Image (cartoon, grey):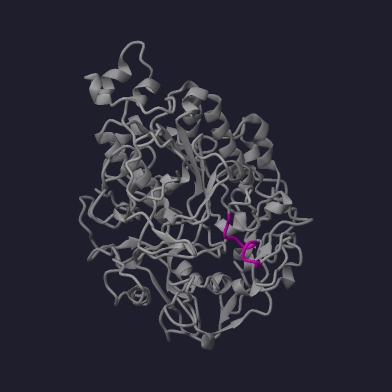
Amino acid sequence: MLKTALARRFGLLGVSLATLALSPGVRAEDANNQIKTASPIKHVIIIVGENRSFDHLFATYVPKSREERVLNLLSEHIVKADGTPDEKFDRAHQFQVTSAPNGASFFISAGSANKSLYSKLPAPDLGGVQAPTGLPILSIPGGDPGLPAADQFLFGTGGTGLPVSVGPDTRITNVNNLPPGPFQLTGPTMPYDAYTADTIHQFFQMYQQMDCAIDKEHVSRGNPTGCLHDLQSFVTTTYSTAPGGTPHDTGQTMAFFNMQKNDVPYLKFLADEYTMSDNYHQPVMGGTGPDSVPLGFADQVFFSDGNGHAVTPPASSIYNPDPLPNTLNQYTVRKQWFNCSDQTQHGIKPILDYLGKLPYPVQTKCDPGAYYNAVNVNPAWTPQGTPSGAGSIPPVTMTSIGDLLSAKHIPWKYYGGAYNVSGTGAPLDGIYCNICNPFEYQVNYPAMRADHMRDVTDLFNDLKNGTLPAVSYAKPDGAMDGHPASSKFDLFEEFTKNIIQLAQSNKEQWESTAIFVTVDEGGGFYDSGFIQPVDFFGTGPRIPMIAVSPFSRGGHITHVYGEHSSFVKFVERNWYLGKLSERSRDNLPNPRAEDENPYVPVNMPAIGDLFDMFDFDRGHDHDRDGGGDRH
């Protein structure tokens, strides 16, 4: 890779990139180095795990440097270093709604007249997790190629050891008598290396969990958008439990790991050594599919005719979150699509009313007649480039960051775990994440495959061989992505560690490489951070983001507001690409914030471009635009 000096402009060489890359004696590495960039970074990788909020992982993290500050449960005095409640535990109190705040219609907030404090947290659930001796992946010959041989044993540890898979998770200390707020998940009988229950994390449910309103009960100087995060357990429990049934999907949304007790050790190490953000968010309310799409589009996909025109999906697939009669939160119809341009559609008006009262103008980005997905919906194409068939999202003609890179002959690849075996019927078939790959929604995906779609095992080889493209996405398969129930977070940590160590082993390449480590979304887990709505879809709660690079050393913590569209902005800025569309979030300005509250941009809506996570030499071309660069 490049030394820290910026390479001379490729255009001065008088040959095309393709010619240079194929010329005898010229490495692909050298070809990448000739592409003009706004920073010394010539290679960027984003590693995307699954379903963990910032406070869920970093609740008790303490910065290595005394000059740094972090906003988490410990610094807010919500919990102590030992994981027990602190003096301001009431800031994270959880409430139950006792009477319908919005009549027979969907609601996203409740006032004191409509809710009461839980006497104790609904007992966290096993949620179907059993696996007394680990998951069946152990029986796969050779294990999972996404991890080194030394780590394969992790797939066979962490089972519950319990004879049941429903009801309270008795591995959790004091599970039936937890106070109504955050609790430490790990303890004497619950190791960090454990499979634990999932929890609800979809669009309408998450809006309710956040309890956002513009009124005197919700808004404060430090929280001008009025999101209290205090209906987490109420929503999961009442949505998932049939009237009169055994409570299900209950208090696990309030769980957190404790870094003071050696939980999440590798991400703690990365935060200590490199740059972390404590103000990076999932881009939208909801789950994996809608939250992965912005990594490619800085926008949301919609139901179309396959030629770029919005059309109405079948009536049987339209979502209706209004509660059933005699319930508070049993949704009438849980399906795929909603039309947020029409406030007469079920569930839409409460969100539009809230956005209209914000102290800054927000464009909803709800195109007339367009239907957007409320849940995970399969993309247009299979990984093999064949049509996904009925029920999938029709191909979209939206421009992706991949399109912009290809137009300038800048190499890029999406590396997905188990991509090579997907659709083959072989072991590990079925755990490639199709909804995680934003490019599979595009009409031109089949033509992209040959040059741009790879397995993560190919990433390992490219790291070793110095053939890493300029821009890389790395997505682990479902067994090691850290998703609750189906995976565990130490597996994702080992996956991440493997990639970073391989990258660092190629010293020349490493000198101009940056690796972003994040997850797709918070998984419904509690987070205490500020939320900035930038359109109808979000943003949502905070999630982890760490930048690992020779240019991000030192344990710095940045507070610039970001989300997955920030990665798109970083790539656009670093490789001089321009914008994706007139409506995409990459058009939003970089945030400006005041010292007394660095988490709330004064120029909302605003999204950063991640340049603030690096400390580049002043002599380089930074293409400065007020983005909060570290200097």
Count the marks.
0
Q: In which quarter of the image is residue 252?
A: bottom right
Above or below 192: residue 462 = above
Above or below 387: residue 219 = below
Q: Position of residue 527 (x, y in %)?
A: 55, 63
**What residue is shown at x 39% (from left), y 50% (from top)?**
566
Q: Position of residue 121 (x, y in %)?
A: 66, 73
Nearest the eye: 258 or 589: 589
484 within the magenta span: no
Above or below 574: residue 224 = below
Nearest the eye: 233 or 540: 540
Q: Can residue 438 be seen in this view?
A: no
Tell me if 329 is positioned left or right of 59 in this view. left
Q: Can residue 449 be seen in this view?
A: yes
**What residue is shown at x 32% (from left), y 37% (from top)?**
575
**What residue is shown at x 65% (from left), y 61% (from top)?**
74
**What residue is shown at x 65% (from left), y 67% (from top)?**
78
User: Which residue, as the protein is rendered here, is positioned at the far top?
Assistant: 24
Tell me if 193 is positioned left or right of 450 in this view. right
Q: Where is residue 484 in the image (x, y as percent from the top left)?
A: 59, 54
User: Which residue, as the protein is rendered here, is positioned at the far right?
Assistant: 188
Q: Position of residue 321 (x, y in %)?
A: 42, 73
Q: What stretch is highlighted in magenta?
A: 69-78
Main SS of residues in magenta? loop
Task: Give the position of the N terminus as an image quadrant.
Answer: top left
Tell me if 606 is positioned left or right of 202 in this view. left
Q: In which quarter of the image is residue 291?
A: bottom left
